[in-house]
Image: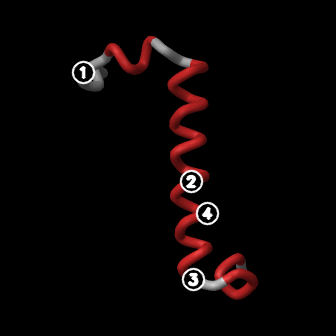
Amino acid sequence: MLAAWVSAVNATVFGGIGTLRVVGLWMAMFPGLRRHQRLQL
Protein backbone atom coordinates (compact mmCIF):
# COMPACT_ATOMS: atom_id res chain seq x y z
CA MET A 1 0.00 0.00 0.00
CA LEU A 2 2.88 2.32 0.75
CA ALA A 3 4.36 1.74 -2.71
CA ALA A 4 1.06 2.71 -4.29
CA TRP A 5 1.03 5.87 -2.21
CA VAL A 6 4.65 7.11 -2.50
CA SER A 7 6.28 4.93 -5.23
CA ALA A 8 8.18 1.65 -5.06
CA VAL A 9 11.61 3.25 -4.63
CA ASN A 10 10.53 5.46 -1.73
CA ALA A 11 8.70 2.56 -0.08
CA THR A 12 11.90 0.50 -0.26
CA VAL A 13 13.95 3.31 1.24
CA PHE A 14 11.43 3.85 4.04
CA GLY A 15 11.36 0.11 4.73
CA GLY A 16 15.15 -0.08 4.92
CA ILE A 17 15.37 2.90 7.25
CA GLY A 18 12.60 1.46 9.41
CA THR A 19 14.43 -1.87 9.63
CA LEU A 20 17.67 -0.17 10.70
CA ARG A 21 15.80 1.80 13.35
CA VAL A 22 14.24 -1.36 14.78
CA VAL A 23 17.63 -3.09 14.84
CA GLY A 24 19.17 -0.10 16.62
CA LEU A 25 16.35 -0.04 19.14
CA TRP A 26 16.77 -3.76 19.89
CA MET A 27 20.54 -3.28 20.24
CA ALA A 28 19.91 -0.55 22.81
CA MET A 29 17.21 -2.48 24.67
CA PHE A 30 19.02 -5.85 24.73
CA PRO A 31 22.80 -5.22 24.74
CA GLY A 32 23.50 -8.82 25.82
CA LEU A 33 22.31 -10.13 22.45
CA ARG A 34 25.28 -8.53 20.69
CA ARG A 35 27.75 -10.55 22.74
CA HIS A 36 26.40 -13.93 21.58
CA GLN A 37 28.21 -15.39 18.59
CA ARG A 38 25.70 -18.18 17.95
CA LEU A 39 22.37 -19.50 19.12
CA GLN A 40 22.65 -22.18 21.78
CA LEU A 41 19.56 -24.31 22.29
Would you name the residue on which mark 1 appears? 37
Residue at left offset 42%, top offset 19%: 33
Q: CA distance from mark 2 to mark 3?
A: 14 Å
- Assign a secondary structure to mark 2: helix
Q: Amino acid at mark 4?
A: Phe
- Assign a secondary structure to mark 1: loop
Q: Amino acid at mark 2?
A: Ile
Q: Do the residues bearing badges 4 and 2 touch, measured as CB atoms within 8 Å? A: yes
Q: Nearer the observer, disc 3 or disc 1?
A: 3
Q: CA distance from mark 1 to mark 2?
A: 25 Å
Mark toward the start of the polypeptide (1 vs 2): 2
Q: CA distance from mark 3 to mark 4?
A: 10 Å
Q: CA distance from mark 3 to mark 1?
A: 35 Å
On residue 14, the disc is 4
Mark toward the start of the polypeptide (4 vs 1): 4
Would you name the residue on which mark 3 appears? 8
Q: Amino acid at mark 1?
A: Gln
Q: In the rendering, at what x and y percent does residue 17 appear?
A: 56, 53
In the displayed structure, would residue 22 be above or below residue 14? above
Q: Nearer the observer, disc 1 or disc 2?
A: 2
Q: Is residue 40 left or right of residue 10?
A: left
Quarter holding residue 10: bottom right
Q: Please state, as top left, top right, bottom left or bottom right, where the N terminus lies in the image.
A: bottom right
Q: Do the residues bearing badges 3 and 4 touch, measured as CB atoms within 8 Å? A: no
Q: In the rendering, at what x and y percent does residue 19 appear?
A: 54, 50
